[in-house]
Image (cartoon, rainbow, N blue to C red):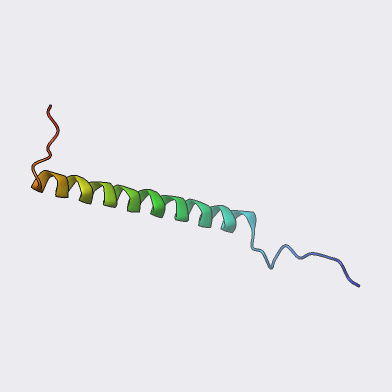
Amino acid sequence: MNDTTSTNTSGTLLQRLGWLVLIWVCSIASLGAVAGLMRLLMGFAGMTPSA
């Protein structure tokens, strides 16, 4: 049996880090969008923060 591994099949380190950063940025952006939408809906319902 040939038990060698190829690094080309899993992608380079830079590509994998790029995907990691892209997924992280998209998750933070979607979290911010949901939080903004909830804040907007709460404002429409009269639940404004007392500043």
Q: Which quadrant does the N terminus fall into?
A: bottom right
Is the residue 35 above or below the residue 16 in the image?
A: above
Is the residue 50 above or below the residue 23 in the image?
A: above
Residue at 40% across / 52% down in the picture?
27
Q: Which quadrant does the C terminus fall into?
A: top left
Is 31 positioned to the left or the right of 46 in the image? right
Q: How many marks?
A: 0
> Residue furthest toward the bottom?
1
In percent of width and height, residue 20 lies at: 52, 53
Is 46 positioned to the left or the right of 4 in the image? left
Residue at 34% across / 53% down in the picture?
30
Q: Nearer the viewer, residue 33 or 18?
A: 33
Residue at 30% across / 47% down in the picture?
32
In percent of width and height, residue 5 lies at: 79, 64
Q: Nearer the viewer, residue 6 or 29?
A: 29
Is the residue 34 above or below the residue 49 in the image?
A: below
Using the rendered view, name the quadrant where residue 46 is placed: top left
Is the residue 50 above or below the residue 37 in the image?
A: above
Is 34 positioned to the left or the right of 47 in the image? right
In percent of width and height, residue 16 lies at: 58, 57
Residue at 86% across / 67% down in the picture?
3
> Residue furthest toward the right?
1
Is 18 positioned to the left or the right of 2 in the image? left
Using the rendered view, name the quadrant where residue 15 is placed: bottom right
Q: Nearer the viewer, residue 27 or 18?
A: 27
In percent of width and height, residue 48 lies at: 12, 37
